[in-house]
Image: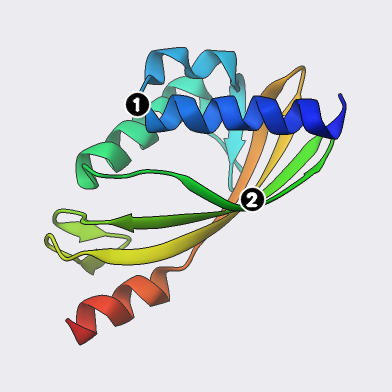
């Protein structure tokens, strides 16, 4: 797959997330997807995202950096949101926070097969503490 084609596929995946069209995730995510080294399956991936959307009603994925080297995508995603309750072990309780995620994806047969995600949890904790 050409780098531009993979980028377009990834953009469509992010659009799917931002529209909360989780029933369409199978068009982008493999049935046997791994997340941070654990096989969670497409259904598990959908459940994870449902929990994220419940905890963060205004969750929106903003791509700020993207490198496409098929079959891999590396992205930096930024978030500016107001989670309810606990987020990554931090009692955010409706406070607005800004944070980023560095994430790597491996594609197989035009679907995400592996995901490695690192979220800047320290930034969230610092913002809540300062508020």
Q: In this picture, is 9 found above or below 97?
A: above
105 in relation to 81, above or below: above
Residue positioned 57% across, 25% down in the render: 12
Q: Which residue is drawn at the image coordinates 38% and 36% (left, top)?
A: 48
Residue 26 image offset from top left, x and y in percent: 53, 14
Q: Residue 93, percent across and down?
A: 12, 62
Mark 2 crowd level (few <14, some 14–19, many ≥20, 10 Å Cα): many
Residue 10: % across, % down: 63, 31
Badge 2 marks a residue whose secondary structure is strand
Sequence-wise, the earlier of marks 2 and 1 is 1
- Left or right of 69 in this view: 40: left
* Residue 112 shows in this picture: no
103 vs 97: above or below: above
Q: Could you say where residue 41 lies in the image, as x and y percent from the top left? A: 52, 25
Q: Nearer the viewer, residue 87 or 20?
A: 20
Query: Which residue is tagged 2?
Result: 75
Which residue corresponds to the image point at 43% horizontal and 21% vertical from the top-left? Answer: 43
Q: Which residue is mark 1?
A: 20
* Left or right: where 44 falls relative to 10: left
Residue at image coords 60%, 32%: 11
Q: Is residue 128 above or below residue 96?
A: below
């Amino acid at each position: 797959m050409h780098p531009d084609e993979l980028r377009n596929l990834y953009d469509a995946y992010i659009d799917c997330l931002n529209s909360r069209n989780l029933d369409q995730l199978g068009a982008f995510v493999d049935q046997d997807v791994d997340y941070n080294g654990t096989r969670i399956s497409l259904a598990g991936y959908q459940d994870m995202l449902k929990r994220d959307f419940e905890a963060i009603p205004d969750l929106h994925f903003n791509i700020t950096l993207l490198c496409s080297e098929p079959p891999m995508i590396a992205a930096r995603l930024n978030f500016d949101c107001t989670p309810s309750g606990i987020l990554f072990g931090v009692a955010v309780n409706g406070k607005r926070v800004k944070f980023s995620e560095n994430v790597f994806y491996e594609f197989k047969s035009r679907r995400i097969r592996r995901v490695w995600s690192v979220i800047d949890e320290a930034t969230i904790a610092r913002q809540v503490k300062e508020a």
